[in-house]
Amino acid sequence: MQKLLLLGDEAIAQAAIDAGLSGVYAYPGTPSTEITEYIQNNKIAEQRGIHSEWSTNEKTAMESALGMSYAGKRTMVCMKHVGLNVAADTFMNAAITGANGGLLMVVADDPSMHSSQNEQDSRYFADFALIPVFEPSNQQEAYDMIYSGFSFSEKYQTPVMIRITTRMAHSRAAVATKPMIEQNQISLPGDLRQFVLLPSIARRNYKQLISKQDIFEDASEISTFNSYFEGSDKSIGIIACGIAFNYFAENFEVGEIPYSYVKVAQYPIPKKLIQQLYASCDKILILEEGYPLIEKFIKGFHSDPKIIGRLDGTLPRDGELNPNLVGKALGKKLITQETVSTFVVQRPPALCPGCGHIDVFNALNEVLAAYSPGRVFSDIGCYTLAALPPLNAINSCVDMGASITMAKGASDAGLQPAVAFIGDSTFTHSGMTGLLDCVYEKTPITIIISDNATTGMTGGQSSHAENRLFQICEGLGVEKEHIRTFNPLKKNHAEAVQIIKEELEYHGVSVIIPQRECVRTLERTHKAK
Amino acid sequence: MKTDIILAGVGGQGILSIAAVIGSAALTKNLNIKQSEVHGMSQRGGEVYSHLRISDQTIASDLIPLGGADLIIAVEPLESLRYLTYLKPEAWLIANSKSFINITNYPDEEKIFEEIRRYKNHILIDAEDIAKKIKTARSSNMVMVGAAAPFMNLTVEELENGIRSIFESKGEEIVSINIESFRKGRDFSLTNR
Ligand SMILES: Cc1ncc(C[n+]2csc(CCOP(=O)(O)OP(=O)(O)O)c2C)c(N)n1
Ligand code: SF4
């Protein structure tokens, strides 16, 4: 046994390596990125030939993981919460196929939206798919859940969700590791049609999945990750899920919690433990990081007044929890003496000085000044920061790929010229299919793929376009003379303006590809040399 | 024994190197550690912080409660004021006076210094200037560790070993520059506290 100081993300990665992982599949996304990066940089993972290359998007990642599970090996797929929307088709259907080799789906939620468009709670997805969830409350538990999770998945032949949140992912603590397990040999499912979801087979598999629900529930009731504590004070009982348990415990000296509580870290919800708590306490306070999922279940249709939490205002309805919010819900007084002066202004994130996106926006803004405002549909990446001053250059950012298709819809509605602004990584993630729609209909649209040769926003991971954007667009059917490239530098400003101007005037599909490497990744390669 | 520290700065200023040194020193003493970091979007020049908790007992929360911190170490003056509500009574505020101005509405520097000085237990130090006199501005974060050293439950030796283990791979010269920076920072606090 070894003790390592690891981020929650790294504990997950280390546990997977130790538990005989054969491949991790992922697309970067805060706060999940460091899981895959840890495996990519790990010597033992390399020696063991563990697959860790980035996937094009979360759906391709999840499908590849499912294929590896089919082949009988242990595999893990990692993503941020909104990535699960992209992979949802696979996710829902993988619950029906079931797993062969251990299949863990790690989803990192971002309550309070530190780096995200929403704060959706992935536990809902798991409930929807009828699969078990592990939700660690600390780094050691994260390690232990992954380590034992593969055999759990294999034993019950089911994919398992590991749900973490930002603070779990990005907080470090000492983790004790376990012995290294050999990887599985290839072994196909006993029934070679288990993964063929023809209606007749899918109906059979679905019945099996339903019949497993009681088994999953029994596993939750006796799981060592879930626990019941009998306190002396019965005025209130606490249900604390995942990391919320720590915020609860923080309000008491070590070993001096007066209340009864149920700590929930494995789902389906351990009903019996909760019923026992409900029966013995006057009120029940529910602490969940994310949506009030358990609270809604228990409070039910009759709005049981005994249940308090996010729904009745005892805790805020949105945003992440912390020790103070939980303390307040427990009736503790907040003690702070200091205040923060009003002149301490926010310091919002911004594009790096020298970033190529800035030069592209400067040219675009200049050309668009001739038109009425509100025509730039952007995507998600560093360039989204152009929504803020001084650039004030974009009018939408919804989900990966939506720039092209939203611009298409607006163009169809008559808003012409309509501009889409997208990065290279987002384009290969989800932009190519939208471009094909435009080509198919010859939609008047100007698409700018600002190519910095990396996935910048999440820290500079490799990007699958690999300098082939011109060929990809040509292959998808864009006319060659309307695929334009330039190098976004100050000295090329006039050229950039001219190109954008010409293509905005063209009544058809144009793609403009400014190409200059991200200054951050450039700096990094220079340093490495 | 328990020390709760808030590290503050701007994305890209490398506050995590401070956390790494203090964390490494605490680990060799077999203390428990929890260290919450900010990754992602704010690293792009936004405000960043880290909660570093060290204790000989189990640590529950990854986040320090308001009114619970023993120390703020800020590598930038404006950032030093952002987390004051986290301080315990009698806690210490260690602030670098070298500002990082990447916003157009950055407040008047004198006003910021005045506010720092208003807080009784403060150290306001020009870490960059001290680091430059040793070699380059690069080691100013270790000047900050030194400036905070008298207010932590860790000895000089433990912290210097922490610096050594973090910078070891970069060669003996880098190690000694950083240790000297640490010592100069500590001297400053001992004479100016
Ligand atoms: C479905 C989904 N997956 C992942 C993310 C996280 N994410 C946001 S932007 C981005 C990458 C953007 O790369 P690119 O478009 O090349 O732009 P750059 O940041 O390099 O400018 C990622 C991975 C997300 N928001 N949604
Ligand atoms: S990380 Fe790269 S792409 Fe993102 S803002 Fe900085 S230079 Fe631009």
Image: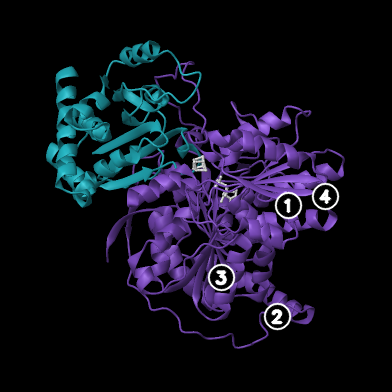
Rounded to the nearest angstrom, the CA distance separating label 2 from label 3 is: 16 Å
The chain carrying label 2 is A
Q: Foreground mark, 1 or 3?
A: 1
**Residue A246 percent across, percent down from the top left:** 43, 46
The chain carrying label 1 is A
Asked if disc 3 and disc 4 are in contact, CB closer than 8 Å, the reply is no
Note the chain letter of the cyan one.
Answer: B
- Left or right: A387, with B155 as reference point: right
Asked if disc 4 and disc 1 are in contact, CB closer than 8 Å, the reply is no
Asked if disc 1 and disc 3 are in contact, CB closer than 8 Å, the reply is no
Rounded to the nearest angstrom, the CA distance separating label 4 from label 1 is: 16 Å
Please state which amino acid type lies under the numbered disc 2: Val
Quarter-of-image position of residue A161:
bottom right
- Left or right: A391, with A351 as reference point: right
Image colour for chain A is: purple
**Residue A99 percent across, percent down from the top left:** 58, 75
Look at mark 2 in the image and give the residue it sits on.
A196
Please identify the residue farthest to the left as the structure is shown: B157
Marks 1 and 3, the one that precedes in the sequence: 3
Asked if disc 2 and disc 4 are in contact, CB closer than 8 Å, the reply is no
Look at mark 4 in the image and give the residue it sits on.
A443
Marks 2 and 4, the one that precedes in the sequence: 2
Q: Foreground mark, 2 or 1?
A: 1
**Residue A328 percent across, percent down from the top left:** 50, 32
Look at mark 3 in the image and give the residue it sits on.
A65
Please state which amino acid type lies under the numbered disc 4: Thr
> Helix, strand or loop at disc 4?
loop
Look at mark 1 in the image and give the residue it sits on.
A481
Does the residue tagged 1 have its C-beta within 8 Å of any atom of ligand 1?
no
Quarter-of-image position of residue B3:
top left
The answer to whether residue A290 is visible is yes
> Helix, strand or loop at disc 3?
helix
